[in-house]
Amino acid sequence: MAGIYIHIPFCKQACFYCDFHFSTSLKKKDELIASLVKEIELRKDELNNEIVETIYFGGGTPSMLSQLEIDTIIQAVYHNHEVISNPEITLEANPDDLNEEKVKELAQSKINRLSIGIQSFFERDLKLMNRAHNAHEAKNCLTIASRYFDNISLDLIYGIPGFSNEQWRENIQTAVSFGVPHISSYALTVEPKTALASLIKKGKIEQVNDEQAQEQFYILTEELEKANFVHYELSNFGKEGFFSKNNSAYWQGKSYLGIGPSAHSFDGKQRSWNVRNNSKYIEDIQQSILPIEREILSKTDQYNEYVMTGIRTIWGVSLQKVELDYGKEYVDYLMQQSEKHRKEDLLYIEDGKLKTTQKGKFLSDGIASDLFKLNQS
């Protein structure tokens, strides 16, 4: 089974924290849509006849597309790949795009899951992040979407400067009150060359407080556990039966094909990524040239990739899989490197799998880097 990710590189305005590839100009939208369709055709053999089980529209802001444009892209996937009878097809959406007419159209299409970029229900936070929607739209779109979709995920951001723990609890409780079955939540991160980094440097916005972010992470896990969410990946919480199939496939090392400018692909042994430039992407695809860079992963790279993704999830890192795929020396290395974290109650072994404890979850990325093997083979 495999997945297809489609990158839609358009946004109404730039969020201050974002370092994803996007443009606020829609001048080349028609050419871009045509190029996405053509790239799907040009790369139809790359999944080696694996059946597609998920299609994910990310961005950017895919909800800026018309229903016809979305349907055209989905039809291209069906025309060039075998797709399971009931695939998970997700559309990332912003609240300001989700009026009743739009949601109704989406519900009548093959889209069966919405991932809504709420980020916060507080006006102050939305302005600080330069989001295109307001607090009223955040709540209103969830009321509307819940009438037409059962499978809804929403995004929340914690660790926002000046954002108290009490406000954070209120954000979580508001999200839960809409009955959504999935929540993705991320710490606000200051990426280089973003507007947020510049504003912090100029003293216009406070520096992000890592200790506060860690506190709010633990509040998040506590509140969502009370609401019967399963913390199945570092940043993701789902009710039973509503884990993201698309994201779970990434973490479990399944193949995925990335379509569109800046989109990444992975087949277990090779990683590739498209050019991060709309004009260059369109120009090359129109000439049937794939604007792709590829990297063959060594055995050590593959091990590191597995550790990096596995340690973030409830499924953990299988010692048996490490031995079968990479050899006993890798298991020995993993046990040696993980020993101090096990002694500090950050990691534990259960049913032959190395997993993070509750205390270790927030630190899982740093722990994973300690488990990486540096010598290439």
Image: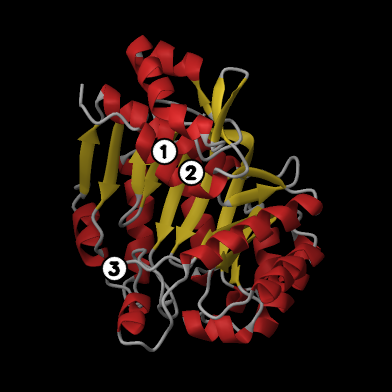
Name the mark on residue 364: 2
**Could you tell which of marks 3 and 1 lies nearer the N-terminus?**
3
Q: Nearer the viewer, residue 330 or 40?
A: 330
Q: Secondary structure at mark 3?
A: loop
Residue under the point 42% across and 80% down:
13
- In the displayed structure, 108 sits above or below 117; it is above
* Percent position of residue 114, x then y: 63, 58
Q: Secondary structure at mark 1?
A: helix
Q: Is residue 195 toward the left or the right of residue 63 in the image?
A: left
Could you tell me if the residues under marks 1 and 2 are in contact, i.e. CB atoms within 8 Å?
yes
- In the displayed structure, 28 sits above or below 53; it is below
Asked where in the image residue 168 lies, by quadrant, the reply is: bottom right
Residue under the point 35% across and 16% down:
326
Name the mark on residue 368: 1
* Percent position of residue 175, x then y: 73, 66
- In the displayed structure, 317 sits above or below 211; it is above
Q: Crowding at label 2, few (<14), some or many (≥20) Cα neighbours within 10 Å?
A: many
Q: Secondary structure at mark 2?
A: helix
Look at label 2 and name its amino acid: Ser
* Percent position of residue 150, x then y: 76, 54
Look at label 3 and name its amino acid: Pro
Q: Is residue 101 visible?
A: no
Could you tell me if the residues under marks 3 and 2 are in contact, i.e. CB atoms within 8 Å?
no
Q: Is residue 174 toward the left or the right of residue 160 in the image?
A: right
- The colour scheme applied to this rendered structure is secondary structure
Name the mark on residue 34: none
Look at label 1 and name its amino acid: Ala
Asked where in the image residue 282 lies, by quadrant, the reply is: bottom left
* Percent position of residue 50, x then y: 46, 27
Name the mark on residue 192: 3
Q: Is residue 132 toward the left or the right of residue 147 in the image?
A: left
